[in-house]
Amino acid sequence: MDKHHDTIMDNQNVKDTVRQIFTEYLNANGHRKTPERYAILDTIYSMEGHFDIDSLYSQMADEEKFRVSRATLYNTIILLIQARLVIKHQFGTTSQYEKSYNRDTHHHLICTQCGKVTECQDAALQDAIAHTKLKRFSLTHYSLYMYGLCSKCERANKRNRKSGQQPPAKSRKGENG
Amino acid sequence: MDKHHDTIMDNQNVKDTVRQIFTEYLNANGHRKTPERYAILDTIYSMEGHFDIDSLYSQMADEEKFRVSRATLYNTIILLIQARLVIKHQFGTTSQYEKSYNRDTHHHLICTQCGKVTECQDAALQDAIAHTKLKRFSLTHYSLYMYGLCSKCERANKRNRKSGQQPPAKSRKGENG
DNA sequence: GTCAGTGCAAACTTTTTGCAACTAC
DNA sequence: GTAGTTGCAAAAAGTTTGCACTGAC
């Protein structure tokens, strides 16, 4: 295993491994190993950051990979979540997903004004969360969403306040604020 | 201000205060002070825990309070969020809300099997999050969702594993995981 | 009196479901 | 061969929008 940047395994290695994990999961649960399922897994592990069903759909429709229906995407994503290969988020109205195998734990900074989502790492924080003692609950994973203003929006607001204008309109997505 | 249980102000005091905060917010932003808006605020601050638009709608339709349309609920909730009197969550597909004024900070334990949401307090954890240094971001609030199995589901699973059965079907809502 | 706010219903978006055709096993 | 999967299209669920009416200012 060679190490470059913050990636522990290289990309192909990860893809092979998750394929194997998925196969084991499918076997263990009596599901069929269809080409659609592997194509979806592969596409997801080729994508960076967050994605929603629609972008996954177009990604698969556009590329050399074969096309699958939205229904199949929804079905397969559920399996992948259960196999712990994908994490689901709900930043706004649309469900967002991201690959979870071999990824560093990270938190999400969500700008309540423009909706931009940034990832953030903090070892101390991760430790604090992982070591929190929970009564009557066995933790498998968690999501920390931190809301506020990104530097860009904050600067824009300061400018506008000086000139007495209203802040810009809010974006539709990710406005949990 | 008298203090009992974990409530700092008594209920009527809180309601009066948030009413005042809302009034100031409406004035400051050139919005009208309609009876609907105050009725919604009042109902929300009479409810415990989380609620969605639908339960708020029936709550207002059923009770002595006057009825408001769903459209108005959606509109008003946005104002209340901006006034920092309500927090929005997205556990599952439906948006969940909760009053935020004078409430202790708390985290959410979400059972990935039955969808049950429990609140949880942990001062050390709150501190760790609040004191995390964020680059280029000014934090206003955060949500920590912890996924796993509630003790009930975990016990049920153990029983079923012994007898070789499948775990029960998952609930529709709150299945991020 | 005016225009922001309301109620209603229609539109829209995202996700789920029913069913016929297909295919992994 | 058969039951799990897929694709499609229709339905459902949640939220937003257009418009005529109302009422806060």
Image (spheres, coloured by chain):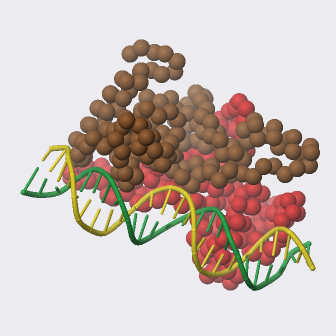
Chain colours: A red, B brown, C green, D yellow
Q: Is residue B44 visible?
A: yes
Residue B73 locus on image (x, y percent): 38, 49
Residue D5 locus on image (x, y percent): 77, 71
Which corner quadrant of the image does residue D9 belong to? bottom right
Point 58% across, 41% down: residue: B144
Q: Is residue A154 visible?
A: no
User: Position of B103 compared to A88: left or right?
Assistant: left
User: Position of B105 compared to C15: left or right?
Assistant: left
Rendered position, A122 above or below B8: below
**Viewport quadrant of the N terminus of chain B:** top left
Rendered position, A153 above or below A36: above
Rendered position, B27 above or below A79: above
Residue C25 locus on image (x, y percent): 91, 72
Q: From the viewer's side, name the closer residue of A17 and A141.
A: A141
Residue A127 locus on image (x, y percent): 68, 38
Q: From the viewer's side, name the closer residue of B87 and A165.
A: B87
Which corner quadrant of the image does residue A34 belong to? bottom right
Rendered position, B41 above or below A11: above
Q: From the viewer's side, name the closer residue of B57 and B150.
A: B57
The total number of labels drawn is 0
Point 59% across, 76% down: residue: A58
Which corner quadrant of the image does residue B163 belong to? top right
Point 70% across, 32% down: residue: A134
Q: From the viewer's side, name the closer residue of A18 and B73.
A: B73
Point 32% across, 27% down: residue: B16
